[in-house]
Image: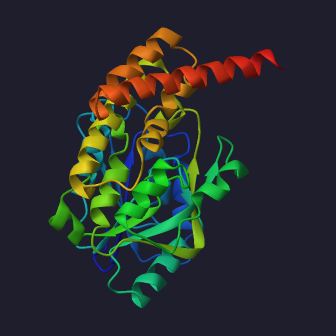
Amino acid sequence: MVKQNNRLAIVIPAYKRKYLKETLDSLKNQTNQAFSLYIGDDNSPEDLWEVIKEFTNDLQIEYTKFDSNWGGKDLVSHWNRCLDLIKNEDWIWLFSDDDCMDTNCVEVFYNHINANPNHELIHFNVKVIDHISKEIPHYEQLNNFETFMSSKDFFKAKILGNIHSYVVEYVFHKKLLSKYGKFVNFDLAWCSDDATWIKFAQETGINTVKGAAVSWRLSGINISSKNEPAIVRRKLDAKLSYFIWVRLILGKLPLNKLHIIKWFFIELDEDKTLNFATKLRLAFKYSNHLWDIGTAIFATTYIVYKNVRIKMALLTK
């Protein structure tokens, strides 16, 4: 049973069992145990409770198994219903069932908010790990945020590829939900977290703490790891919705069209299942929605250029 004397609620929308014990171990080993743990089982076919029950004496856990699976069709709705599980805590940390945190993350969080009571959105830098929990060093330089970032700073850095951002490394004050609403809902949850941090950061920005990190798992079984034709198209649809949304929130964007196009079509560039004609058609379709016919022509020219460069590189090997 959850004790109501903690200021921090860690919320796990759970579905996969494979890495859940490792996740819970990282919480059990926290140097500061002043948090409540809420686990929302998305009607998983796997027996999550078999793992969770081993930690009930060590962690303040409130476990809920929902009667229906939402994450398979609408992941953000599952996130949002898990937020409804929390009780009187002031701060919310939406975590996951396959990621981990350094043993001092909770301690560092409390030290930071005690020293900075006006901050509302806290961020931890990230280490990317693989399916055997080994750190992937390639990502390290992309996961070091500035100490402070505004909404526009964050948007620009993401589009330029200067930083990576996930969902599990942010802690936010509960009053932001009353002020701005819950997580912004796009298909596959693609860009939903970015949009949410942008709206949450409008007043006090994103404030990154030092001295602890979150480990995000690139496991091959999450959405970020998949590059199938249907998934690529759904990601493009979600990106279009996000781009329309962000223009309404931020107004004039601090980037030129080429930067936007490079970001928008990265999944299309990297996909190896779609033929060249399909890529051109999709590039024209989506970029015409982004701006106008001129941009559509520019975007298709960019895709042609990228394709020719790839083929030339292969021929010269």
Q: Is residue 217 left or right of residue 35?
A: right
Q: Is residue 105 left or right of residue 121?
A: right
Structure colour scheme:
rainbow
Q: Residue at x 59, y 25 (%)?
A: 306
Q: Residue at x 67, y 22 (%)?
A: 310
Furthest residue in direction front, as rendered: 294
Residue 140, x across and y down, in percent: 66, 56
Q: Quadrant of the C terminus?
A: top right
Residue 222, x across and y down, in percent: 49, 36
Q: Residue at x 60, y 20 (%)?
A: 307
Q: Which residue is at the front of the view, 129 or 247?
A: 247
Looking at the image, residue 302 lies above or below residue 89: above
Residue 257, x across and y down, in percent: 41, 41
Q: Which residue is at the front of the view, 49 or 237?
A: 237
The answer to whether residue 277 is visible is: yes
Q: Residue at x 48, y 56 (%)?
A: 157
Residue 106, x across and y down, in percent: 49, 74
Q: Which residue is at the front of the view, 277 or 23?
A: 277
